[in-house]
Amino acid sequence: MQHVDLKEIRAGLHVGKKVTVCGWVRTSRDSKNVAFAELNDGTELSHTQVVFDKAKFNDNDLAPMLALGAALRVVGDVVNGQREGTYEIQAESAELLGGSDGTYPLQKKRHTMEFLRTIPHLRVRTNTFNAVFRVRSELSYAIHEFFHKNGYYYVHSPIITGSDCEGAGEVFKVTTVGFDPTVKSEEEYYKKDFFGRSAGLTVSGQLEGEVMATALGKIYTFGPTFRAENSNTPRHAAEFWQVEPEVAFADIDDIIGIATDMIKYITSYILEHCATELKFFEERFEAGLIAKLQNVADSDFARIDYKDAIEVLKKSGKQFVYPVEWGLDLQTEHERYLTDEYFKKPVFVVNYPRKIKSFYMKQNADGVTVAATDLLVPGVGEIIGCSEREADYDKLLNEIKSRGMKLADYANYLDLRKFGSVPHSGFGLGLERMLMYVTGMSNIRDVIEFSRTKDDLK
Ligand code: 4AD
Ligand code: MG
């Protein structure tokens, strides 16, 4: 269908010319001699005004073309708008491509986020979600660009796996076998199943990423990961996207440097390429958003040892709900205090106790901590989980055994430590968490078009 993108009209490329444009009616006004429709075709956040001279249009034809949500094709002249630097289209003829009646749920008023979550198939037609998904696309592109420019290979890790990378027991089962009351044991049950063993949806592409990195050197995966986390919080989803670089010949300090460079790069990219959207989020959702992001792009991140972070929390004078003690994991409230109030910028918390972290992390010389770090950011908390990996065969073997994990599931992974083992490190950035940080959206359900959370799948 030959037509011009509205983005080009708004850029002033066709002024004085006759064009054909398409789009959905986002708002409209009708008066005695003239009617106006604001059209949006998805090429830009802002709308383009179409002016209908009522002398040229039959009332019965025009009315459905002014309905909110209707899809139109319009032929008309591009002229200067009322405000300097704006352009509008004087319609000569118009065609209703798809009508929309009074039941269209997006009316002129401002809808609540809760209501909009009930209509995931339509909410992207609001300015807010249009902006969110535009930024999501740009952010994904920026991530690819950063890694590509820095010599990383993009590899694809499997969605169906037989191991639990994080060992947290949050794996969704993949099965074709239904309920069978005659089955005696778990083993017997899985024998009958599709793979002849238990299988699940991946919680992380890391283990396969390590395989690739120990041949290709620098790789990243970027894809969906799944967690059957029973936590109904604004920052946990059952399905979310993770970017996971894995780098051979890199220690914990190297990977912290890489994570910092990546966050700065993608933040600068969004500042440059999504200025309209950020201005919108700043006005509607988070005052000071643009200055915050500029600060991320321009200044250093903080870094603190886990044991010192515990001291900071203890001395904060705050009444936390969860206890603060060496050896206990940091809860969201602790993370938020450290980053929102104490550092007021992104902070890497380094060297966590071994017992609260995953099996694959490199054991520090003290025997009780691991070379692991989380990057915490104001307003969101953890956005990156990162570590140097244990490269020593025996230490890793003991860790797998002592955690009661099934050795057979990790045999290939252990092999990597048998044949040319090297220091290597990696991290996982939650795409939605980063998106929340960049847009100021406070609920993860609002940065995924079709969000999957506990008891909620639409
Ligand atoms: O800290 P996590 O669990 O680390 C890993 O999975 C490592 N295997 C990554 C690696 O080293 N390659 O998860 C990484 C990030 C978190 O920091 C968070 O941003 C995001 O993934 N994340 C979630 N995002 C949304 N919903 C959830 N349920 C999430 N769980 C983790
Ligand atoms: Mg984590």
Image (spheres, grey):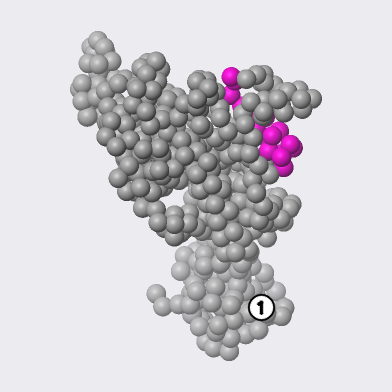
Q: Residue at x 25, y 21 (%)?
A: 190
* Residue under pointer 1: 86
Question: Which region is colored magenta?
Answer: 327-344
Q: Where is residue 152 in the image (x, y as percent from the top left)?
A: 39, 53
Q: Residue at x 28, y 15 (%)?
A: 186
Q: Is residue 70 above or below residue 410?
A: below
Q: For the N terminus, which image quadrant?
A: bottom left
Q: Where is residue 57 in the image (x, y as percent from the top left)?
A: 57, 80
Observer-nearest of 241 and 96: 241
Q: Is 329 in the magenta?
A: yes
Graded by Cα atoms within 10 Å as few (under 14), some (14 to 19) or many (20 or more), the crowding at tag 1 reads some
Q: Residue at x 56, y 48 (%)?
A: 260
Q: Is 134 in the magenta?
A: no
State the SS at label 1: loop
Residue 59 visible in rendering? no
Q: Residue at x 61, y 47 (%)?
A: 437
Quarter occupied by residue 423:
top left
Q: Where is residue 16 in the image (x, y as percent from the top left)?
A: 58, 89
Q: Position of residue 18 (x, y in %)?
A: 52, 87
The answer to whether residue 315 is left or right of residue 420 is right
Q: Pick out the residue farthest to the bottom.
A: 16
Observer-nearest of 251 and 449: 251
Q: How many labels does the image show?
A: 1
Residue 435 visible in rendering? yes
Name the amino acid, label 1.
Thr
Q: Magenta part mainly helix, strand or loop? A: helix
The answer to whether residue 262 is left or right of residue 195 is right
